[in-house]
Image (cartoon, grey):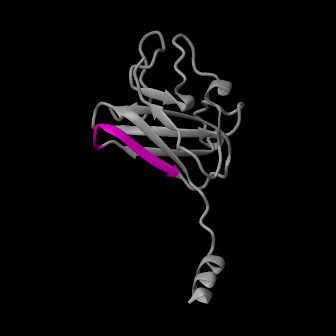
Amino acid sequence: MSLFFFLLFHLLPAREPELKLVMTDIREAKGQIYVAVYDSPNNYMSYDQSKIRARRVLDVRSNGSISCTFPELPPGSYAITCFHDINSNGELDTNLFGIPSEPYGVSNNVRPKFRAPRWEEALFQWKKEGVPPTIRLEKW
């Protein structure tokens, strides 16, 4: 019997850890949430798909919170941006002054009022274990 457990645990491929992200404070059950993960300050907040390390588009079907995983990401240093595209037009809507009019969030829940969050503020270290990052989606 012990030989069975030895073979079971040592011969099966090890499962790689997955970065799990939780987004909270979803107030409207419609639209999509766009999530982008960056691994370089030079690419941070770029819309160019080739500069985004990983991305997800999640359909919003309920209020509260939603989560997603990134099994393709190895442990490392990342920054995450996301927004709730309530009207499903595929972009973060802004007002006349460029201020977002839809809920958005950044890793570490950085919320400067009169500028975009900087790479250093949003940067976090992901290891194989630990508490998953949580991002609050809020309007300005």
When asked about the image quadrant of residue 59, the answer is: top left
Q: Residue at x 39, y 32 (%)?
A: 84
- Rendered-image quadrant of the C terminus: top left
Q: Residue at x 57, y 14 (%)?
A: 115
Q: Is residue 84 left or right of residue 107?
A: left
Q: Residue at x 59, y 57 (%)?
A: 17
When asked about the image quadrant of residue 103, the answer is: top left
Q: Is residue 12 visible?
A: yes
The chief SS type of the magenta part is strand
Q: Is residue 89 visible?
A: no
Above or below, comparing residue 18 to residue 78 in the picture:
below
- Rendered-image quadrant of the N terminus: bottom right
Q: Residue furthest front?
A: 2
When asked about the image quadrant of residue 18, the answer is: bottom right
Q: Is residue 61 left or right of residue 111?
A: left
> How many numbered circles does the render carry?
0
- In front: 125, or 95? 125
Magenta segment includes 65: yes
- In front: 6, or 57? 6
- Image x and y of residue 50, in percent: 64, 43
Please state the extent of the stretch shown in magenta in the rendering: 61-69
Q: Is residue 86 left or right of residue 69?
A: left
Magenta segment includes 60: no
Above or below, comparing residue 105 to residue 78 in the picture:
above
- Image x and y of residue 127, in percent: 65, 47
- Image x and y of residue 10, in percent: 66, 78
Q: Is residue 84 left or right of residue 49?
A: left
Q: Residue at x 29, y 37 (%)?
A: 63
- Image x and y of residue 31, in percent: 33, 37
